[in-house]
Amino acid sequence: MRELITHIQQEGVVVNDDVLKVNSFLNHQIDPQLMQKIGAAFHAEFANHPITKILTIEASGIAPALMTGLAFKAPVVFARKSKSATLTDGNYAASVVSYTKHTTNQVIVDRQFLTADDHVLIIDDFLANGAAVHGLIDICNQAHCHLDGIGIVIEKAFQPGGKALRAEGYPLKSLVRIKSLANHHVTFMED
Ligand code: 5GP
């Protein structure tokens, strides 16, 4: 997605060889017009699927997921980070290691918002090791819903998550794939 690449080139901050900050349009301040185009791009990619739910994880997945839900006219469910490790009967739950905070969170989704009849598109902002997406897949499996696809705004292709998910056979679409963040420079796969 050319416009997203331009935003990353102009506004992205390479924190170190592993982490990219895009706080000016995605992770702190949000650019609604760009999010709308991101939603439209995911819709174009998965338009032939009968998507009934968009599933993401709080907080940074919500903006692109919401605009994707708008494009599909489908509700958006976000997995909530739960302080309590005790599972309540009404929730699906999964453990997710946070890439940026190095902590393990229990994430939960209320059972009433995801059922076996649902066709789900998972959306998230970044893909690194794949822990967040695997947690959401775990929740989909618990709900016995149909996972139609996974949409990622920015995949760091030099980290193992994308390769693992493709090897596992999941339909994965990343709008931008980053080859390297070395030398404080963003190199894209397309370069
Ligand atoms: P994973 O679970 O795939 O290891 O990491 C993905 C999650 O960690 C995303 O939900 C995202 O919030 C966060 N994340 C991973 N890498 C980055 C990064 O380089 N920049 C930002 N802003 N978030 C990241």
Image (cartoon, grey):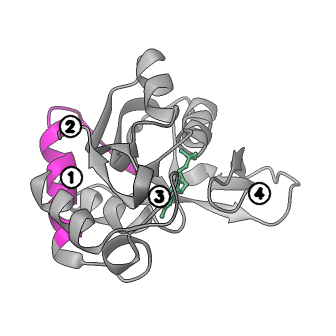
Check mark 3 vs ligand 1: CB closer than 8 Å? yes or no. no
The one of 8 and 108 positioned closer to us in this rendering? 8
Work out how far the residue at label 3 is from the one at label 2, CA to CA, in angstroms.
18 Å
Tell me where the magenta segment starts and ends, as one range: 34-54
Q: What kind of residue is marked 3?
A: Val
Sequence order check: which comes first, mark 3 or mark 1? 1
Which secondary structure lies at badge 2?
helix
Image quarter for residue 76?
bottom left
Q: Residues within 10 Å of mark 1 (few under 14, many from 20)?
A: many
Q: Which mark is residue 77?
A: 3
Q: Is residue 171 left or right of residue 103?
A: left
In the image, is residue 44 part of the stretch drawn in magenta? yes
Residue at x-position 79% and y-position 49%: 89
Which secondary structure lies at badge 4?
loop
The answer to whether residue 154 of the structure is visible from this angle is yes
Sequence order check: which comes first, mark 1 or mark 4? 1
Sequence order check: which comes first, mark 3 or mark 2? 2
In the image, is residue 106 part of the stretch drawn in magenta? no
Q: Which mark is residue 133?
A: none
Q: Residues within 10 Å of mark 4 (few under 14, many from 20)?
A: few
Work out how far the residue at label 1 is from the one at label 4, CA to CA, in angstroms.
33 Å
Tell me the quadrant of the picture where the C terminus can be found: top left
Labels 2 and 1 touching (C-beta < 8 A): yes
Q: What kind of residue is marked 4?
A: Thr
Residue receiving disc 4: 103
Q: Which mark is residue 46?
A: 2
Residue at x-position 82% and y-position 54%: 88
Residue receiving disc 1: 72
Residue 145 in the image: state x and y as whole percent: 48, 32
Q: What kind of residue is marked 2?
A: Phe
User: From the viewer's perspective, is the residue at label 1 or at label 4 nearer?
Assistant: 4
